[in-house]
Amino acid sequence: MTTLKDIAEHANVSACTVSRYLNQNIVVKKETEKRIQSAIKELGYVPNVVAKALKRKETTNVAVILPKINSLYYSEITSGISQTLGKHHYNLFIYEVDNLNLSENEILQLMRENMVAGIIIVGLFSDLSFKESIPSFLECGIPVVYANRCIPYAGFPLVYPDLTEAGKIGANYLYAKGKNRMALIHKKLPNDVLALFLDGIRQASEDEQKPFIIEIDDRMDLIKDCVPLLLQNNINSAFVLNELSAVNLTKALIQANIQIAEDIAVLSLGNSLLSQISTPELTCVDLQNQELGIRSAEIILSEIQKEKVEQVTVLEPFIIERQSS
């Protein structure tokens, strides 16, 4: 294996000069730099990143803890994190909780063993996992960003979308289309999270009727169980708080010979590739998933550099109009 001494001899400089050059501690003459770079290339020298990290007691590894990666939802967020870390030459380590089968304490130990410089914890709005473990990370000197959880500030940076605003602009959009008989369809959201959307819908218009709320699950046959409810209650718009459920609902409505947009408009929460390949393409309330990842990465990098950061970052949603409305 090529050593610093080998490079020094090849470049006709001291090993100390090579070491300080590689660690950016000195500026050398252009001629000397060319000789060192040429030696590195010819001898195939590869820096020992692990040894450097141990010596400096610091790394460029950032961990992202999330339930799973095999979903468009999490991959969009992770993409934003990855592109930001890459620009600053940091490495991304992904820990899928669903596949690790480890306790929070065991995952904390993994973070220590892998010498991560910072941690971004991503989950669904209602997922509060790791919230109680974060003080343990902080006590170890590992900064943390808690992403996508709509909770009050709790002593560590938060990044999340404004769910109340999402409800408000979604309802305003449908009301402006004359769709004032709205069904709010969700998939087992906890009451406190559902209340955020309902508050936004209430703010949209005091004069409109309250939405008809339908809770669905994976066992439900939408054609048999959901579509009749919509028809019986004269619903002319469905605001669906889950993108895959919105896709499945449009399929069920089409199979029931209901005209999407004309008879019942469908508005989805979330704007991934799913909405673009749906038939018809879905109008969405975009929560800025990739931007959430970007902001989370920017904050964790600032924390690592011990810079001052915003403690709470709230992302504003917006409407993407397509064929379903």
Image (tube, grey):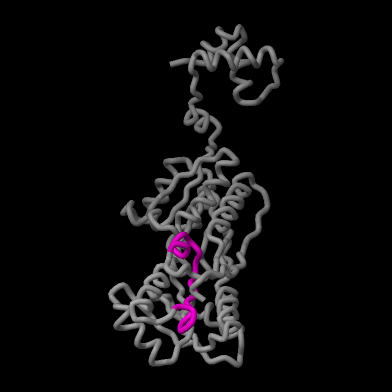
**Residue at 50% across, 71% down:** 323
- Identify which residue, 69 or 66, lies in the foreground: 69
Queried whether the magenta region covers residue 273, the answer comes back as yes
Count of numbered badges drawn on the protein: 0
Q: Which residue is drawn at 51% across and 33% down?
A: 53
Q: Position of residue 235 (x, y in %)?
A: 45, 88
Identify the residue at horizontal 46%, vertical 65% (top origin).
Answer: 275
* Residue 247 falls left or right of residue 210: left
Which sits in the foreground, 296 or 288? 288
Q: In this view, does 97 lie above or below 193?
A: above
Where does residue 290 sit, x and y in percent of width and height? 54, 56
Nearer to me, 7 or 268: 268
Q: Where is residue 219 in the image (x, y as percent from the top left)?
A: 28, 75
Instruction: Pick the quarter of the image with the N terminus.
Output: top left
Magenta residue check for 186: no
Q: In which quarter of the image is residue 232?
A: bottom left
Q: In this view, does 165 lie above or below 122?
A: below
Using the image as rendered, state which of residue 22 and residue 308 is in the foreground.
22
Q: What stretch is highlighted in magenta?
A: 260-277
148 up-or-down from 186: above or below: above
Q: Position of residue 314 (x, y in %)?
A: 61, 65
Q: Which residue is drawn at 55% across and 8% down?
A: 10
